[in-house]
Image (cartoon, coloured by chain):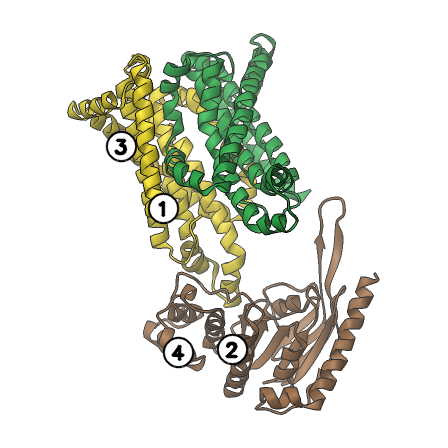
Amino acid sequence: MVRDWLVRIATFCALLLVWQLVAQQMSAAILPTPQRTVNALIALIERGELQTAWGQSAVQVAVAMVLSALLGVGLGVLFGWYRKLDQLFSPLFGSLFLMPRVALIPLIALWFGLQDVAKVMLIMAFSFFEIFFTVRNGVKSVESEYVDVARAYCVPQGRTLRTVVMPAIRPYIITGLRLGLVYALVGVVLAGFFLEANGIGGMIYDLGSNFRTAELMAALFSVMVVGLAVNLGLRQLETRLTPWQVSR
Amino acid sequence: MSTSKIEIDGVGKSYVSGKRRDRKVVNALQGVNLTIAPGGFVSLLGPSGCGKTTLLKCLDGLIPITDGEIRVGGKAIKGPGRDRAFVFQDFRLFPWRSVLGNVCFPLETTVSSRAERETTARKYIEMVGLSAFEKHHPHELSGGMQQRVGIARALAVNPDILLMDEPFGALDAQTRELMQVELLRIWELTGKTVVFVTHSVDEAIFLSQRIAVFSARPGRISAEFDVPFGYPRNEHTVRGDGRFVELRHEIWGLLKGDQNSSFSE
Amino acid sequence: MNKYLLPASGVAGFLIIWQIVGAFQGDFLSSPTRMVGEIVYLTTEGGLIGLVLITLGTMLIGWVLSIVIGVFVGFLIGRYRIMSVILEPYLIAKYSVPIIALVPLLVIWFGIEEGFLIATIIIATAIMLVFPTAAGTKETVRTYDQVARAYSISGWHFFIKILLPGSLPFIATGLRISVQRALMAVIVGEFLVGYNGLGTLLKDARIRLDADEVFAVAFIALLVGAVLTGAVGYLDRRLSSWRPVAVTS
């Protein structure tokens, strides 16, 4: 283990060195040095720009996630439980799931404009389906296994849904929320690119079009940190809340 | 009042299977007749896919039958009832509930007092010897212990009939023998009627009073045997007995013949 | 027959309601007939087929390169522990980050031509093949390493006769999960820089905000996505057919 970490640290240092050497040969607008990038990050934080951008994005993501979670879990349970309903709507939902969600941007712009409402909608277009399909498939897969037990012991349907299905799909709900949040990050970045240019996506877009490459790389670094934190944090939560299930 | 607890009368179960083009009707069960006395221990024995588990699920009412009638205590059954309890091969415990919570589960619809439920549940947890583990969750228990919980859960509703679907099939050989002895002890203690599905000839002989041997396609009972041993039974005396070897030989012959005929089909 | 009745009536009901509502709120909701009319117009006058083919062509080039790179890196990680020690932290980091955010940086590095689009696809999708391939390689090596040594198979033969076929179902899984991402990457790239293709259609619809065009473009994207997913799903089933249990995730 110790040796592994030594190797990792060594390669990381080598990578930094290569970056430094290559960057020295190039214009700072193409590839800034590590030093410049770190300075840009500090400057972005000191001027409060990074916090403002992330603040806007966080609000948009939070609203969209609450809505997608409510809708996704609610509809997911409903569709998983009532097979007829599922068959009726599955081709519609399924085809939306297969569509590259970016293609909804003109439609969202037409219906909701370019401001916060539109952005929440775009983020939901990314996060809702992940939650909905994970929960729906969860209900379907616990059905045969656990619902038979409830039937064998004459437990009425409503009670089965509440005391058997809901706890049984808990891991699926948490996995769905994690995937939903990961995709919500994609949504919020694209919202900044193609709708009103604010939030972290808008910031990256502006920095890119003005060739402020050092600050751009600093902003991208912050996206990486947030993405990692979200993913790893929620994975931890997953194993904590459902110790009986190996995380998928 | 009839003298038999369960009467299976000309029962058939068929369903349609296969994709569009090669759709065909499968007769999982056809013309099955069997009567079981109150307090009896009967095994349904046969190769996998012969319909013995299907019959057991029909007995519980989990699967509707397409032909004939099943009567329990003289009345035709329409669906799952609280006079019958099902023990699953793969245990089917709820992983989010403790041992106590799992055993309490079937009581929650009938007993409103939590304390009362837990008292009942504890009684059966003690009967299967798991009192020290009532706070544990299923994933912390071995397979044998999990199935003990499964049996306690079934007993908790105080059914007249225990329907057991290869309950020890997922356990290793040693645990299996231990559980067989345990089951007989509990059966003698409670006096339930037991219908026990297995594909092990030895298990069927060791446990039951009567054995119904199945053959496949269509699933039906090809022979019935009475087991000539009294209870309580002891592993060594039963297996060492000449009649055990003889009965085992006879049933094996029957199963083998069935297997060969199904190969030559 | 019955199996298709409910889904079909769901779609039919949706189309009928859309048609009726669209008759009153056409500027906002379009309608199935108006949408089809727009698609016909785009096909005859707007060179729709050409644009779709350009996008698909770019996507396929980028995707095939992603597969080659992803599978190669996956093999390295699965075969040599040192490579997994070195690379895995970066790969995990990259895996949980919205890669699409990198697009403005890629514009700076690669310009706004086809090279940029292909770089975007590779960066977004190669990773989706690395993990399945690495897992497949690890499992194949674990299962068959001793068989191979017992029969004195090594080097190139081990790769061609054991590693590649053994990992194929896993690679197929990678193909299945990466195709949508490749399509999304190329569309985002085209959309952002205005390169000819589906992305320009989106850009145009986004600017003009004409309901018929907006729906037509969304529907075309849906169709392309569905056809690609169907084709890769078929490929996946063919490549994994010898495997009794389907590989997931």
Callout 2 and callout 1 share a chain: no
Residue at x 33%, y 24% (from the top left corner): A18
Residue A176 location, quadrant: top left
Residue highlighted by disc 1: A235
Q: Is residue C43 left or right of residue A111?
A: right
Amino acid at the residue labelled 3: Val
Q: Give the structural element (helix, strand or loop) at label 2.
A: loop
Residue ranking furthest to the right? B264
- Which circle, 1 or 3, is nearer the viewer? 1
Tell me if residue C4 comes above or below residue C207 in the rendering: below
Q: For mark 2, name the chain.
A: B
Query: Which residue is at a point 56% across and 41% down the rendered structure image?
Result: C170
The residue that label 4 is drawn on is B120
Place of residue B121 in the rendered image (x, y in percent of width and height, measured from the top left)? 40, 76
Image quarter of residue A74: top left
Secondary structure under badge 4?
helix
- Residues packed near mark 1 inside 10 Å, few (<14), some (14 to 19) or many (20 plus): some
User: On the image, numbered disc 2 is attached to which residue?
Assistant: B159
**Is there one chain holding both mark 1 and mark 4?**
no
Residue C46, compared with residue C158, is above or below; it is: above
Mark 4 vs 2, N-terminal side? 4
Task: State the image coordinates of residue B52 (x, y, percent, origin top left).
Answer: 67, 69
Rendered hue of chain B is brown
Q: What is the display colour for chain A? A: yellow
Chain identity of mark 4: B
Residue count near mark 4 (Cα–Cα under 10 Å), binned few <14, some 14–19, many ≥20: some
Q: Distance between the residues labelled 2 and 3?
A: 56 Å
User: On the image, numbered disc 3 is attached to which residue?
Assistant: A59
| Mark sitting earlier along the chain (1/3) | 3
